[in-house]
Image (cartoon, helix red, strand yellow):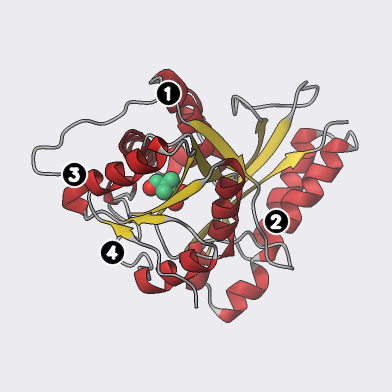
Amino acid sequence: MTREVPVAATVAELRAFVRTRRALGERIGLVPTMGALHVGHLSLIEAARQRADRVVATIFVNPTQFGANEDFSRYPRTFDADRAQLAQVEADLVFAPAVTEMYPAGFVTTVSLAGPASAELEDRFRPTHFAGVATVVAKLLNQAQADVAVFGEKDYQQLLVIRQMARDLDIPTEIYGAPTLREADGLALSSRNVYLSESERARAPSLHQALDAASRAIARGASIDETMTQARSAVTAAGFEIDYIEARDTQTLAPVTDGAVGALRILAAARLGATRLIDNVAVAAT
Ligand code: PAF
């Protein structure tokens, strides 16, 4: 029988765990999540496990990163199933604070961002999102004092925002970006995939297929502008409403156009019915 994963509900309990393990000379890995865990998250735990002796997963549906019209109240909350999955991959602790533990009465501070957070991608459609993410992640990193924290490349702009925030605020935790896990048909694993109806699920892989085709075309030397136009047409034809599909500099997220030098990333967000999917792919260096 797998062992139950202990739960810490307070920062004091989390810090006591970390202090004890550190005193034994162990490295601590942190995997922040909002729960509704799937195998993509479990791969983040495995990535942390390879870089640390003890792995702490956090489960906190962070209200401050949801906009007024977003899915905070209907976001899937599956704590018991999450904890069972964390036991399977032998996480050492779950930190699951209440909203009042993270944001006690009188809380007023927010991290203010620029750079990758104002690249006009997610931030254009979710203007308050990254301030909420960066603030909660700064808190989690300070609370846990981990050696390494793992985030998925699926939320690529988020990963760059967190890297920049940790660097700018001198947070010593190493930020590691783990590759996106996909279904066999290419759909990126996401907690929001449960919202898709059967027919939407059947069409959903078209997003990744279009990004993948665009990535290969640009790597072969095709025009970036024309390739992105074709990718947008393919995604629209599959029934999506596109928020953005863009080729960007992989480090800065600055727009790129034909003749661009350096590594590129293609990033997308598009809505299939009521569900908003995001994805991104690297463009292989030529
Ligand atoms: O990627 C997520 O699940 C969330 O944005 C994070 C990093 C856990 C912060 O709430």
Residue placed most toward the observer, 93 or 234: 93
| Residue type of the residue flagged with mark 1 | Ala
- The answer to whether residue 150 of the structure is visible from this angle is yes
Instruction: Identify the residue at the far left of this view.
Output: 105
The C terminus lies in quadrant:
top right
Label total for image: 4
The residue carrying pointer 4 sits among few (fewer than 14), some (14 to 19) or many (20 or more) residues within 10 Å by Cα, namely few
Secondary structure beneath disc 2?
helix
Secondary structure beneath disc 1?
loop
Give the distance between the C-alpha atoms of the residues marked 3 and 4, in whole angstroms: 17 Å
Horizontal placement of 120 versus 263: left or right? left
Give the distance between the C-alpha atoms of the residues marked 3 and 2, in whole angstroms: 37 Å
Which of pointers 3 and 4 lies earlier in the amino acid sequence?
4
Mark number, residue 208 = 2
Which of pointers 3 and 1 lies earlier in the amino acid sequence?
3
Residue 104 image offset from top left, x and y in percent: 13, 44
- Determine the residue positioned at 34% across, 42% down: 20
Residue placed under numbered mark 1 in the picture:
114
- Determine the residue positioned at 14% across, 37% down: 107
Secondary structure beneath disc 3?
loop
Residue placed under numbered mark 3 in the picture:
103
Does the residue at mark 4 contact the one at mark 2 (Cβ under 8 Å)? no
